[in-house]
Image: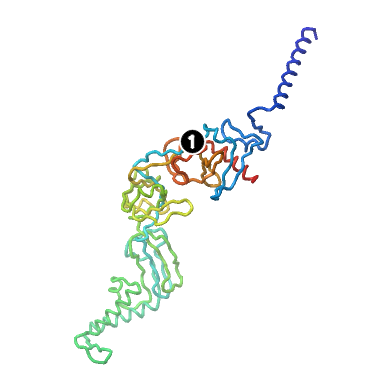
Amino acid sequence: MNNATATKRAHLMGLLSLTSAWLVLSMLGGCERWTPSRADPDSVSAEIASGYYIRPSEKATVVHAADGRQLMMIPHLQSQEGSIGTVREVPLPGVLEATGLVTFDDRLVSTISSRVAGRIEEMRTSQWEMVERGRVVMVLFSPDFMTAEEEYLQATSGRSNGRSTPAETSYGMPVHGVDISTSLRAAAIRKLELLGFSPADIAAIRVPSTSVAMRAPISGIIVSNNAMRGQQVNPGDQLFSLATLQRVWITADIYQSDMSRVRIGQNLEAVTAPYPGEIFKGTVQRISPALDPNIHTMQLRCQVDNPRSLLRPQMLARVRLITPPGLALVIPQKALVFDNNAYFAFIVAGPDAIERRRVAIGDWKEPGFARVVNGIQPGDRFLTESLKFNSLWHAARSKT
């Protein structure tokens, strides 16, 4: 190694030594702004906003306010104006949208039940099958049928033979002019009707039978089938349920902030993903008298025409109601954090104090912003960096 190279190397080593010494002195002397280290386990929890950190000696703490709220105390919070925003009100469009669920109109659901004790001889339909009114869905065997048919045949036979007997009152006095065979026939027909016989079934009786055909009372879909061939049944057993789809319910939830914009009889339109070009029209028929206790929403029950039976139960639909104009509370999306299946915002609750407040979110189409429908008020001040404050909140609570 020549002398020139050795001299350059010595100068370089001296420069490095001076730099190292300056860094050590700087660390020992401290600095006004503390920057957290990734190796420090508290460094992530200490960071609360862009460009702002809590010194190790000034940790955030969680305290209980007199009204029961949990507040997080953060030193020098009020000086960080760039990280604090204010809830603003903006005009709402004249259309209120909500997600709805299609269900059967329970007023259009009919059941077929057994009216006697017996046994199912034949099954002529199955679940989800479309049937027309009057179609035979099953054949039921029961000795009660034969007894009722025999009484009917005897009553009609007596009338056809021209026999007329005066009826007697409970006191044994004759009442002339009343044909007892007519009364017996009417009673026999009534008994058959109670057993499920249709007028056509009654007119077709020629000889007593132990079987009768059970027919669909309406046109619709078999939505439930509790019957099978050979099954023993008792009076009152529900065997089938039928429902028509010509008209359906759509149930939708709206937020309490929109309650004043909805009324019974209000017109609406519904659209679905399977039929994007199809618009289904209807009206609001029912409004729930109470709110959901968990999410504070009010349920609407809407009657929607479905002439082609395209809407099916459990299908999701988008409901649009034409409503009067209103106001919405809007904050930046980054001011919200989703934690433990809920949304939260950090609201300034006083000097150097914030409250982690649960909020409910509604639909909003402005990019970068969210509509808050419950949990905040106009003029509330919030922290814009919710994700970082949420980490600090959990860290502070774990040490409380």
Residue occupying the far bottom of the picture:
172
- Residue 383: percent from left, percent from top: 52, 37
Which residue is at the front of the view, 359 or 196? 359
- Residue 356: percent from left, percent from top: 54, 44
Give the quadrant of residue 33.
top right
Query: Which residue is rendered at x = 66% and y = 37% of the image?
Result: 42
- Residue 70: percent from left, percent from top: 57, 47
Disc 1 packing (10 Å; few <14; some 14–19; many ≥20): some
- Residue 215: percent from left, percent from top: 35, 67
Query: Which residue is rendered at x = 74% and y = 14% of the image?
Result: 12
Residue beneath disc 1: 85
Query: Quadrant location of the N terminus?
Result: top right
| Helix, strand or loop under label 1 | strand
User: What is the count of numbered marks?
Assistant: 1
Is residue 9 found left or right of 369 in the rendered image? right
Which residue is at the front of the view, 1 or 128? 1
Query: Which residue is rendered at x = 24% and y = 92% of the image?
Result: 173
Is residue 154 found left or right of 221 in the rendered image? left
Is residue 204 found left or right of 117 in the rendered image? left
Which residue is at the front of the view, 308 or 118? 308
